[in-house]
Amino acid sequence: MESIIHGVILAFGLILPLGVQNVFVFSQGATQPNLVRALPAMITAGLCDTFLILLAVLGVSVIVLQFEWLRLILMIAGILFLIYMGYAIWKAQPATTETNQALPIRQQIFFALSVSLLNPHAILDTVGVIGTSALKYTGTEQILFTIACIAVSWIWFIGLTFAGMMMKKLDDSGGLMNIFNKCSALFIWATAIYLIIDLI
């Protein structure tokens, strides 16, 4: 029981702060015409987090991130993707009753993958916090800890998608969502600048 509570608290602590991944999943819930169209972003983000958590618990990523050249490639790729994604979200038109313009499935998956797997800080947080915390447990307790972390991640992304859809219902004209898109793009570009400064 302790391992489950520990996993839940730890996962919420890592996922609650406003991040690029959270912003993107929420924005898809708000811009897509219906829930089904918003699922690709939500499912991709959930699968990516599941993959990273499993990798962290197994300890494989700790070995991989010891290579400086790999960290550098991750940072540069992450910066480029964030700049491009910020531009796409800035230009995106929120779906309204008059228009159904929103990111297509392929772009949703592509962006969700990039903000999940090409964000070095997210990877390091997962490895450094969840990976090291998992070392406290063995056998069944470690499995329960891992499942708790993964469950929190999925519940959070589902909640963000529904929250985005609720916001869209409150804003039929799309004006509020347009402002949110602009703010999201600025936030994503600010994250890219932060990574550039960290790289330098």
Image (spheres, helix red, strand yellow):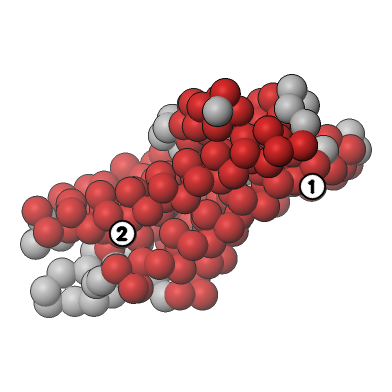
- For discs 1 and 2, the disc positioned in front in the rendered view: 2
Q: Which of the 4 image quarters holds residue 87?
A: bottom left
Tag 1 near tag 2, CB within 8 Å: no
Residue 112 circle label? none
Q: Is residue 87 above or below residue 148?
A: below
Return the x and y of residue 109 as percentages of the image width and height: 53, 67
Taking the spot 59% from the left edge, 44% from the top edge, the residue there is 147
**Left or right of residue 26, residue 148 in this image:** right
Considering the image in quadrants, where does the C terminus appear? top right
- The amino acid marked with disc number 2 is Gly
The total number of labels drawn is 2
Q: CA distance from mark 1 to mark 2?
A: 31 Å
Q: Is residue 195 visible?
A: no
Return the x and y of residue 47 as percentages of the image width and height: 58, 58
Q: Which residue is mark 2?
A: 29
Taking the spot 12% from the left edge, 59% from the top edge, the residue there is 169
Q: Which residue is mark 1?
A: 73
- The amino acid marked with disc number 1 is Ile
Taking the spot 33% from the left edge, 55% from the top edge, the residue there is 161
**Left or right of residue 16, residue 170 in this image:** left
Q: Is residue 163 above or below residue 11?
A: below
Q: Secondary structure at mark 2?
A: helix
| Nearer to us in this view, 103 or 87 | 103
Q: Is residue 107 visible?
A: yes
Q: Secondary structure at mark 1?
A: helix
Taking the spot 49% from the left edge, 62% from the top edge, the residue there is 43
Task: Indicate which disc, 1 or 2, sits on the residue closer to the N terminus.
Answer: 2
Considering the image in quadrants, where does the N terminus appear? top right
**Left or right of residue 166, residue 105 in this image:** right
